[in-house]
Amino acid sequence: MAKTLNVALPKGRLGDKVYDMFEEAGFECPSIKEKNRKLIFENEAAGVRYFWVKPSDVAIYVERGAADIGVVGKDILMESKPEVYELLDLDTGKCRMAVAAPKGFEDDVQTTLRVATKFTNVARQFYASTGRDIDIIHLNGSIELAPILGLSDVIVDLVETGTTLKENNLEVIQIIDTISARFIANKSSFKFRNREIEKVVDGLARVVEGRKKEKETDK
């Protein structure tokens, strides 16, 4: 029997949703739903071994080969640009990478735009494409506070519902990209274990298409 595929899943709500997709695709591992402190969950019959990691670490585990495959947000791929293959958009965990500012904000192009964000590479690349001169202020949390307290002019951050922005008198002024969960693979694993990985891709793709059809039917 071929050895199992190591699968890195993001901890939290997104990881739970994604595991359900793997289960639906035929790669179930019942022990993962048991209440315990185990770190690794294996089902040899299905050929998978799952482990939970911090969402921002998934790509590192896959890039370095500790995991053959994994699921990561597109935002992390955009920011860190890991050396992995992006094989499938799972059409879940959807939100937007956006620029937001206080309501009524007017950009004075004669001055350097102060941009607060934890996505410094994304912000730098986006504004480089527009030719705008910026000063990036790297923050790790509560990004919305920066323009409120005058630390920055705008922010670059993920926006899901926009509720937090509205409650703090901020609004989206530009959309950079649409974000969702992506299925990724280690480059070496994809070369040497292509058949097993493609089987997972095909299974997940059927789940994604099936759910899209269900949504269309419900409309």
Image: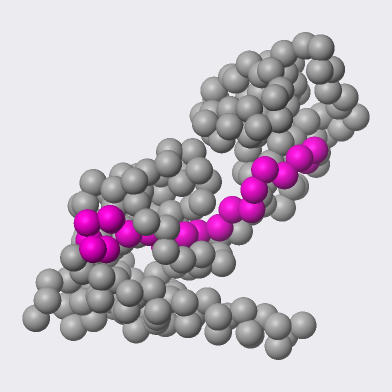
Q: Taking 16 as reference, is 195 above or below it? A: below
Q: Nearer the viewer, residue 110 or 142?
A: 110
Identified at 42% across, 41% down, the residue is: 81
Decide if residue 59 is on the left or right side of residue 75.
left
Decide if residue 123 is on the left or right side of residue 166.
left
Q: Nearer the viewer, residue 160 or 84?
A: 84
Residue 2 at x, y percent in the picture: 12, 76
Decide if residue 124 is on the left or right side of residue 152.
left
Identified at 78% across, 31% down, the residue is: 101
Residue 121 at x, y percent in the picture: 52, 31
> Does residue 14 appear in this view?
no
> Does residue 189 appear in this view?
yes
Kindly report the secondary structure that dominates the magenta region of the rendered protein.
strand
Q: Quadrant of residue 49?
A: bottom left
Q: Report the residue that reaches farthest toward the left.
A: 1
Q: Report the residue that reaches farthest toward the top.
A: 111
Q: Taking 198 as reference, is 157 above or below it? A: above
For the image, the number of numbered tags is 0
Q: Taking 26 as reference, is 31 above or below it? A: above
The C terminus appears in which quarter of the rendering? bottom right
Residue 53 at x, y percent in the picture: 33, 51
Q: Nearer the viewer, residue 83 or 29?
A: 83
Q: Quadrant of residue 156?
A: top right
Residue 75 counted in the magenta span: no
Magenta-highlighted residues? 172-191
Decide if residue 63 is on the left or right side of residue 128.
left
Q: Taking 18 as reference, is 67 above or below it? A: above
The N terminus appears in which quarter of the rendering? bottom left
